[in-house]
Image (cartoon, rainbow, N blue to C red):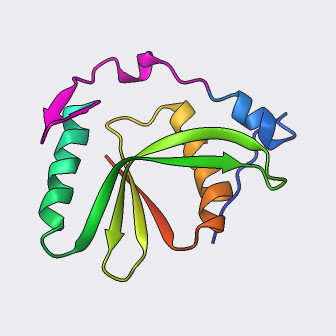
Amino acid sequence: MVTVSYVRGVTSLFMVASLIVFSSQAMVNAVSCVYNGFTYDSKFEASCAMDLDWLKAGEITGSDRQFPIEIRSQAGDLIRRHKVDFRARLKDGSYQLIEAKGFETPEYKLLKKLIETLWLPLHLDHSYTVLK
């Protein structure tokens, strides 16, 4: 089941998308880290990558870093592009999108709602998880 939240005074998804402003300030306390030859935005994200590598031994069949998604309106207009930290391929053929977030900003919470309400219903073989 998908839950839709309404923002007072916002009459369209385009208005919602225009409220999303991402900046480097969201990552003020994050320290870049290199794991397995790849640079990650934070130590936590690198730790999640290491955990996924361990899971490849049995629980998942593979994973992708920085998996791109396009969030579109119901009319098909592009609202926003986003790169999810990881996409894990599960043994049953489904996928799990994984975001590693040490702190959820208000902007990210809005993006999460857009993913849950617009992207996931069109991709039923995917689920979305936020690791904190």
In the rendered view, tell whether residue 14 sits above or below residue 64: above
Furthest residue toward front: 37
On the image, the x and y values in percent for residue 7 come to 75, 40
State which quarter of the image contains the N terminus.
Answer: bottom right
Residue 37 lies in the magenta-colored region? yes
Please give the range of residues in magenta.
21-41
With 89 as the anchor, is 50 left or right in this view?
Answer: left
On the image, the x and y values in percent for residue 91 come to 30, 80
With 110 as the anchor, is 128 left or right in this view?
Answer: left
The structure residue drawn at horizontal position 14% and vertical position 37%, both measured from the top left corner, is: 37
Image quadrant in which you'd find residue 89: bottom left
Residue 49 lies in the magenta-colored region? no
* Tally of marks: 0
The structure residue drawn at horizontal position 84% and vertical position 41%, both measured from the top left corner, is: 12
On the image, the x and y values in percent for residue 59 come to 21, 75
In the rendered view, tell whether residue 106 sits above or below residue 71: above
The structure residue drawn at horizontal position 85% and vertical position 33%, both measured from the top left corner, is: 9
With 104 as the anchor, is 124 left or right in this view?
Answer: right
